[in-house]
Image (cartoon, rainbow, N blue to C red):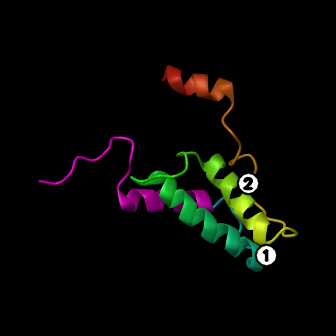
Amino acid sequence: MPALKSPDRKPLAQMRQVVQQELDHIPRWPKATQSLLRQVYWFYRMNSLGKKAELPNDRFAVLRKCLEELAKDHPDAEFHYDRSFFSPISESELAGRRDR
């Protein structure tokens, strides 16, 4: 008998789709630095969506973790991303989501 799926966890194909859509907000260029950010984001974000998540299921928290990790090896690198998309959720947005 297969194990029951947690209602807040997504199937693998759906997880990949979510991460692909979020990666649209991290440009590919300049390739040297952005490729690193995109790779690390994919790794951590897939983990955050999985059954054994070590990070919160929050794209802002995942991006922040990526930038912290990359800064250790690349302190002078400048990474680009859509700041409005990767912003923390405001209290008013959170309240609006609860009302739905």
Q: Nearer the viewer, residue 46 or 87?
A: 46
Residue found farthest to the top:
99
Let me know if residue 3 is in the magenta part.
yes
Residue found farthest to the right:
76
Q: Which residue has dot 2 on it?
A: 82
Q: Which SS class for mark 1?
A: loop
Q: Residue 73's quadrant in the figure?
A: bottom right
Q: Is residue 51 left or right of residue 24?
A: left
Instruction: Give residue 30's mark.
Output: 1
Question: In 3D space, how far apart are the residues under numbered discs 2 and 1 (Cα atoms)?
Answer: 15 Å
- Residue at horizontal 42%, vertical 54%? 52
- Residue 64: image x %, image y %? 70, 52
Q: Which residues are magenta?
A: 1-23
- Residue at horizontal 54%, vertical 27%? 97
Residue found farthest to the left:
1
Specify the amino acid type for callout 1: Pro
Q: Is residue 7 left or right of residue 85?
A: left
Let me know if residue 12 is in the magenta part.
yes
- Residue at horizontal 66%, vertical 47%? 60
Q: Is residue 88 above or below residue 26?
A: above
Q: Which SS class for mark 2?
A: loop
- Residue at horizontal 88%, vertical 69%? 76
Q: Nearer the viewer, residue 61 or 85?
A: 61
Q: Which numbered disc, 2 or 1, marks the residue that appears first in the sequence?
A: 1
- Residue 43: image x %, image y %? 55, 65
- Residue 57: image x %, image y %? 52, 46
- Residue 22: image x %, image y %? 59, 57
Q: Is residue 32 left or right of residue 2?
A: right
- Answer whether labels 2 and 1 touch (C-beta < 8 Å): no
Specify the amino acid type for callout 2: Asp
